[in-house]
Amino acid sequence: MNDLIIKSYSPETFRKEAHQLADLLADELERTQEPVIERTINWETPEDQLAYWQNDFKSPLITDPTDLFRSVISRSNNLHSRGYMGHQAPPPLPVTALTAAMIAFLNNGMAVYEMGMAGNAMEKIVTSNIAAKFGFTEEASGIITSGGTLGNMTALLAARASVFNSAADTDQSQLAIMVSGESHYSIERAVRIMGLDTENIIKVPVNDRFQIRTDLLEAYYQEAAAQGKKVFCIIGCACSTSVGAYDDLDAIASFAASHNLWFHVDGAHGAPAIYSDTYRHLLKGIERSDSVVMDFHKMMLAPGLSTALIFRLGKEGSRTFSQKADYLWEDQHTDEWYNSGKQTFECTKPMSVLHTYTIMRTYGDQLYSQNVDTLYGLAEEFSVMINQHENFELACEPQSNIVCFRLKCGKESDLINRMVSQEMLEEGRFYIVSTVIKEEFYLRVTLMNPLTEISDLEELLTAISAIATRHMVAGQ
Ligand SMILES: *Cc1c(COP(=O)(O)O)cnc(C)c1O
């Protein structure tokens, strides 16, 4: 009767399929490291993609998932390819495919201690280690959460809880935050979820390097106060998403201190610069912040989602989700690091810290410093290449591994660069993305693969030029 169940848990089948998958992924790794970039993405329209899978889904049941896995690979964006330089997701370290299997197999959901004994201890160790890197004291503590979006929201909730801790009846309708006009959309989303008016997100303009204008902070604060707004938090970008600009955290810290504001650093992408002797200076002042978000699944080579949220004063963070749940914990109010669900938005949460713990235990901080140095360095070299090229221009000098640039085509720039963007996608040798800066369209590259080489970037500019030339000739 339960024959299917018995078959589906067969250790022998699992052993065989796992070996096959390891071979499949290792072959893929080998292929994507080839110098000649053949294909990063095998682009298909959403309709064609859907039709393929609808057809697959109707087909007879399969006995071995290997062919299915092979189809998924050929229909996915291959982040390990040297031509992958699009969004801020890394080619995950191969060892994290193994930790991912461990996480799924053990399925320890973390929220209460017995459901994640190893994981809860690892979280404490990893977050304490990172807190010390940022220059925080023993009073700091952190949590791991599923993504920077959730991390930012948790930090903002902690900020509000901290400021309005004792005054439950305080009118919260005029609460406001200050942030640069370049901040990630997750900030605005979080603030809206918290019930704040969008008008109470005070967006401070940026300078020509897209950093928050710290000379304007006081004026914007005073203007808000005059309107009856109660600013409780200011956010620094480290770095911003669109062009990768680092705000002056030290200046923001001083401003925050002068008005007793919570200072949160959105370091989802760029906080790992802390590991680099060359780029650490970009984060000067981070040690004075109240909270920092840092994604492991961007510059720290882990697969999504896994994010550290560090509080300079751990006790501030632990108040965020004070609430009773008798079936999970008898006493909500004691600060028990090992029942991590008390401090996170999530209830069931994967033991995603295993990726980072394993990376740290295997390679140490050195791997992170090499990754940051390689990718930021590659972006610098790419920007020099663009500056020297007569057909291309930068949106601004890069401060990280994000480079925004375009073909110079005068009034046609928007049109031509849009066409280039679409054709590059369909061609699929490289994967790059785009952004709009000051209402103009730019190509956007995030150098995420540390195996990408200068020659690949030269090849990229050649490929873009070739598309543009075809269009210009066709347009004449
Ligand atoms: C990516 C990013 C986020 C969102 O993080 P997720 O992990 O994708 O939820 C927030 N802020 C910045 C600056 C980012 O780069």
Image (cartoon, rainbow, N blue to C red):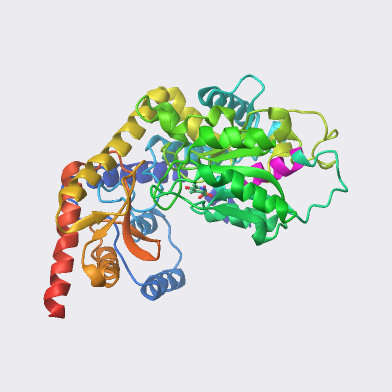
Q: As drawn, which residue projects farthest toward the top?
A: 138
Point 44% across, 41% down: residue: 246
Q: Give the tally of numbered discs.
A: 0
Q: Position of residue 340 (x, y in %)?
A: 69, 34
Instruction: Name the dominant secondary structure of the magenta segment.
Output: helix
Note whether residue 337 is visible. no
Q: Is residue 428 above or below residue 456?
A: below
Q: Position of residue 180 (x, y in %)?
A: 53, 50
Q: Quadrant of residue 359?
A: top left
Note whether residue 379 is visible. yes
Taking the image as shown, residue 222 lies to the left or right of residue 401, namely right
Q: Quadrant of residue 300?
A: top left
Point 50% across, 40% down: residue: 267
Q: Is residue 460 above or below residue 324?
A: below
Specify the quadrant that holds the N terminus: bottom right
Give the camera-side residue of 371 and 236: 236
Q: Position of residue 4 (x, y in %)?
A: 56, 55
Q: As drawn, which residue projects farthest toward the bottom?
A: 476
Give the camera-side residue of 374 and 243: 243
Taking the image as shown, residue 376 lies to the left or right of residue 56, namely left
Specify the quadrant that holds the C terminus: bottom left
Q: Is residue 72 above or below residue 311?
A: below
Specify the segment rendered in magenta. Answer: 151-162
Q: Quadrant of residue 106?
A: top right
Q: Position of residue 46 (x, y in %)?
A: 40, 72
Taking the image as shown, residue 103 lies to the left or right of residue 365, namely right
User: Magenta includes 152?
Assistant: yes
